[in-house]
Amino acid sequence: MSGATYPLPGLDASVEIRLDRWGLAHIRAGTALDAFRAQGFNAARDRLWQLDLWRKRGLGLLAADFGPGYLAQDRAARLFLYRGDMAAEWAAYGPQDTRAIVTAFVAGINAYVALTEARPELRPPEFAVTDTRPALWQPEDVVRIRSHGLIRNVLSEVARARVLARAESRADGLDADDLRKRISPPHEPIVPDGFDAVDWPDDLLDDFRLATATVGFSPDRMAATRAEAWDWSKVDAHGAVTRGPRSVPKEPAEGSNNWAVAPSRTATGRPILASDPHRVYLQPSLRYAVHLTAPGLDVIGAGEPALPGISIGHNGQAAFSLTIAPMDQEDLFVCETDPADPDRYRSGDGWAAITRITERIPVRGGPDETVILGFTRHGPVLREDQGRAFALRTVWSEPGAAAYLGSLAYLGATTPEAFGEALRHWSAPSVNQLYADTAGHIAWFMAGKAPVRPGHDGLLPVPGDGRYDWAGFHDPGALPRSVDPASGWLATANEMNLPPDYPAEDRKVGFEWAEPWRARRIRAVLGGPDRHSLADSQALQGDVVSEPARRLADLVRALPAAGDPDVAAAQAVLASFDGALHHGSAAAALIEVVWVRHLRPALLAALVPDAGTRRLLPPGDTQSLIERLETGLDPAACAALLTDALAAAYRTCRERMGADPAGWSWGRLHHALFAHPLTALRPDSRWDIGPLPVGGAAASVMHAEYRTDTFRLTHGASFRMVVDVGDWDRSVFINVPGQSGDPASPHYADLAPVWGRQDYVPMLYGRAAVDAATETVITLTPSPA
């Protein structure tokens, strides 16, 4: 067993960090604040480059390290910093002393940063590649940063506005928009008075997209001159900052699954809770698993590396997990500006002032850049154009909306009632929280700030003159919940899960949800007659059945025998396809290529002749599109589309994988590559992990969203967890590609092959089990500051 000892200023007593063989850190401290302080130190030990980049991106400080090519992204990020009352901010997260917890956590990060100055060999190699240094944190940095969170739906609002503006009639516009995004429950969008998006600027959402984009590195961007700085202000179809053409923005593909099964329905006689959040694939992973033990605190699970505590896991008596509940937490307000004074905008019968804030952004290799940020009472101004100021109203501007930090309030909850009460302090992102405890209870709570919209429904931008202002937020108790349902199980998958009797039209919490495929499959499995086991939950998290793929194959099988040899060969490949997108399946490869490369674009072209409207719709709502294929088209037209797509897809597969379909497989195309952000700056790619062949697709429970040009995964479950509630050491997890973000660490990529074969490692909790699995002991000792 290896070990090390480090000083950590501020500790009341020594702290022990036990690293098990899978890289999970078990932190044992004498006080809760010491545990959080050690958590910050340990997060920096494993993820310092990621943490430093997270902070600099969120605060708008990238250009100071990486040069003028990052100025536009810095300015955009600063628009969304929390600028309200800090006392209200700290108080919003619950009864615990959030400020003290965050302060201790940040002090731990700073202690490790200071240690790397004294011992440069501890500094991750990325800093040498970029010739930068990690910076020290302030506690306020953690809570002021908002743009790393997930809220919605301004991208969809603007897309819908553009689709309607191009239509000959409102009915035509709504019909076309249904192909872009299905509204649920059924509802006709409220079109505000004076609505007209015909001449809205193409760069309207550039600042929003820049603020929420990941940080990319390329030689061109790193070498950008001051004169070229503002060229780097666009975001492409894959979310990368570019100086090339911008793409039409679409809502991100993040999702998640979770379920809780009551003792009456499990093989163990104890609850089972499963969680697999679907987010963008990164290197290192977005999530970080940790175990914190101190008097009054004993939690294990995953959280964001830059935040104290965990948001998914258990506390030895209750387990908890979350998925996104796609409530609508933002709106675009179109403000009329005063022709005589562009610093004023229409408010009722008069005018209100646009607040202008001047900030200086440090830039590597040159003087600071002075930028001016505009704010209305609605929020930051994204764009000013032709007598209009487009301002974004978002829960990010409210106290308590730092993403996931609300989890601190429920770490000690041991009853459904206490858990629900803690969620009153949860603001963003909006989530479905599932809960299960050793008493046998299971529960579901929808949580998040839900705006009250007296004059509109959030589906379209609205005038900013006061008629459509928000009127506060719904009481958290007005959001739906369920405790110990008769079914014996609960599950969510971002689908429209408002109960049938919920007053959706009155409360307008949201009308844009994920497509129903994953939820349907989970319900079908959990609702079966068998008692559910831990192995069943693991298998369900890796389930690759795709209802859209099966329905497309059914349509293909209904076609008459083809004369074209390529069509006939494609029909033969799909003859017995059951909808399971196994990575070794030739039929899975063919049906996905049929859909994404050929049939979907051809179907959109057939249904929406206007090219300008059609460019606003991709990737399209699969549910709407398949329904049109099945029942909304003339049978001859449908057959022609299918036949042409089959022939083209067969040729594509032949070109990509060879002449014999026996050698084709979905995994030859569909793959995970965990590319290091700095790969483009280095002469080799030893820091990249993969490619790994992967099954599934966006519609399967094993959500595996991918780029249609390269078939490389973009979004999915990098972290998975299955908890045996009560027999905690039987719980399992996986965090791909590894727990550490340091390329020199043995835990940088060790979990990738485990994840690749749909397997797990133990999430050990008991002291004896943790001790037996420990490979390294790190001791932190009190020392002077």
Image: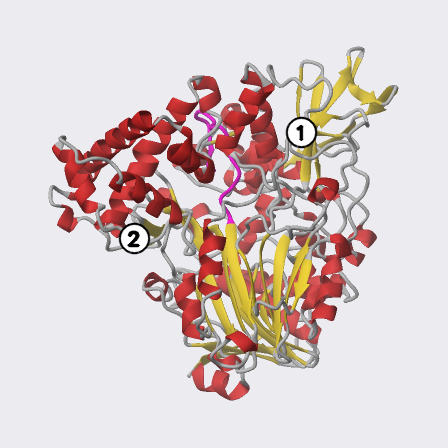
The answer to which image quadrant residue 752 occupies is bottom left
Q: Where is residue 754 shown, x and y percent of the image? A: 35, 66
Identify the mark at residue 276; answer none if there is no mark: none
**Residue in the foreground of this view, choosing between 585 and 378:** 585
Q: What stretch is highlighted in magenta?
A: 239-254
Mark 2 to mark 1 CA distance (whole Å):
57 Å
Q: Residue at x 78, y 52 (%)?
A: 89
Could you tell me the amino acid type at mark 1?
A: Val
Identify the mark at residue 371; answer none if there is no mark: 1
Q: Which residue is drawn at 41% across and 76% down?
A: 21
Is the magenta region chiefly helix, strand or loop?
Answer: loop
**Residue in the foreground of this view, choosing between 367 and 506:** 506
Q: Mark 2 points at which residue?
A: 578
Q: In what element is the residue under mark 1?
A: strand
Could you tell me the amino acid type at mark 2?
A: Asp
In the displayed structure image, the side of residue 383 where residue 754 appears, left or right: left
Q: Where is residue 368 shown, x and y percent of the image? A: 63, 33
User: In the displayed image of the protein, which residue is found farthest to the bottom?
Assistant: 768
Residue 366 visible in the current orientation: no
Q: Which numbered disc flags the more N-terminal residue, 2 or 1?
A: 1
Indicate whether 392 appears above or below 754.
above
Q: Residue at x 32, y 43 (%)?
A: 711
Q: Where is residue 766 shown, x and y percent of the image? A: 54, 84
Q: Which residue is drawn at 56% across and 41% down?
A: 62
In the displayed structure image, the side of residue 419 where residue 206 appears, left or right: left
Q: Where is residue 408 shown, x and y percent of the image? A: 69, 64
In the displayed structure image, the side of residue 44 where residue 125 appears, left or right: left
Please tell me whether residue 247 belongs to the stretch shown in magenta.
Answer: yes
Q: Which colour scheme is used?
A: secondary structure
User: In the displayed image of the protein, which residue is found farthest to the top?
Assistant: 340
